[in-house]
Image (cartoon, grey):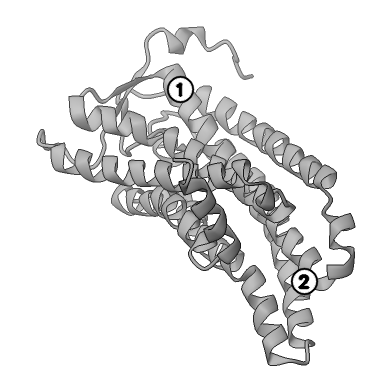
């Protein structure tokens, strides 16, 4: 029976985050992560600002992209500021509640991105396969409902994960062999058999991941079929470039997230896990603004208009 109050544990437990090394000279690593974090903030804030302030970009495709930028900002801000503080001060402790909060939001933003990329795939499917009916299929009202459903559904999924982890009895060692509170390193600290937590993690993860992946994959099956049936090479090229940015983003996201999550906890390797976590947490938020805007003429025009007011 789970004790949701957790009073006996929360009064005494503080975790120590091991980070990347035991060396006291962490300034070089701090500088690197600070530069990366500032680049993530700048790139995604600029994307969101352009979409918000330019009325030409108030379409479902760009509204969804703006929401993706918010997810990237929030997901990295859940982890990197605390990591930067630890690197700078060498104070590597985190409270029980702080650790569970970080865990919850890490899973929350991951699920949000799964669902959001699926909705973006559906948006491209509607635009390419049903261009004449696109305005009806992806009206602003329906887009708003999709976004609300994405954020609400994603908020529910991490609850059981967090409750299961929070109720584990932890051994005398409180050192989390990671640079933030994630499921696998926390499960490793438990004294009890954690098979129920691992099963719940995989089942819940499969429900979210497979449902989002199925919608994304099926959308692209119809998209590719439609593109191949376009007679002119110019038409095929134009249709492909309409969804190319999103497809690249999907490949990077699923590649890094599968490498991080699809493996048994028994095969947990700390250094490998840290590497994949870095790729997942940093690479996607850094690349997304570039992927979606670097060859987007409409966005470049919006950025120039915004630059005049800065």
Q: Residues within 10 Å of mark 2 (few under 14, many from 20)?
A: many
Q: Nearer the viewer, residue 226 or 280?
A: 226
Quarter occupied by the C terminus:
top left
Residue 13's place in the image compared with 264, above or below, is: above
Determine the CA span between mark 1 and mark 2.
52 Å
Any mark on residue 26, and which?
none
Residue at (58, 25) in percent of width and height: 163
Q: Tag 2's secondary structure?
A: helix
Residue at (34, 51) in percent of width and height: 269
Residue 211's place in the image compared with 297, above or below, is: above
Residue at (37, 10) in percent of width and height: 12
The residue pinned by badge 1 equals 169
Where, by quadrant of the figure, is residue 283 drawn? bottom left
Residue 206 can be seen in this image: no
Residue 60's place in the image compared with 21, above or below, is: below
Which tag, 1 or 2, sits closer to the chain's start?
Answer: 2
Q: Tag 1's secondary structure?
A: loop
The residue pinned by badge 2 equals 128
Give coordinates of residue 95: x percent, y percent. 38, 17
């Amino acid at each position: 029976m789970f004790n949701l109050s957790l009073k006996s544990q929360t009064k005494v437990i503080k975790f120590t985050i091991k980070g990347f090394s035991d060396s006291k000279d962490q300034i070089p690593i701090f500088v690197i992560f600070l530069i990366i974090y500032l680049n993530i903030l700048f790139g995604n804030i600029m994307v969101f600002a352009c979409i918000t302030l330019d009325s030409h970009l108030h379409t479902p495709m760009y509204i969804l992209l703006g929401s993706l930028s918010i997810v990237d900002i929030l997901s990295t801000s859940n982890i990197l500021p605390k990591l930067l503080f630890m690197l700078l001060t060498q104070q590597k402790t985190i409270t029980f509640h702080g650790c569970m909060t970080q865990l919850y939001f890490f899973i929350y933003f991951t699920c949000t991105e799964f669902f959001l990329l699926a909705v973006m795939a559906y948006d491209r499917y509607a635009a390419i396969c049903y261009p004449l009916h696109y305005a009806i299929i992806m009206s602003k009202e329906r887009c708003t409902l999709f976004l609300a459903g994405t954020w609400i559904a994603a908020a529910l999924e991490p609850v059981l994960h967090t409750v299961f982890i929070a109720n584990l009895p932890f051994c005398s060692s409180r050192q989390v062999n990671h640079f933030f509170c994630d499921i696998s390193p926390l499960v490793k600290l438990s004294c009890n058999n954690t098979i129920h937590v691992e099963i719940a993690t995989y089942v819940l993860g499969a429900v979210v991941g497979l449902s989002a992946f199925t919608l994304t994959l099926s959308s692209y099956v119809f998209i590719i079929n439609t593109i191949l049936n376009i007679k002119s090479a110019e038409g095929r090229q134009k249709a492909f470039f309409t969804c190319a940015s999103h497809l690249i983003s999907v490949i990077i996201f699923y590649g890094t997230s599968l490498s991080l999550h699809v493996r048994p906890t028994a095969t947990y390797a700390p250094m490998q896990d840290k590497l994949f976590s870095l790729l997942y947490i940093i690479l996607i938020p850094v690349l997304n603004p570039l992927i979606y805007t670097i060859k987007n003429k409409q966005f470049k025009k919006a950025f120039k208009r915004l630059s005049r007011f800065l």
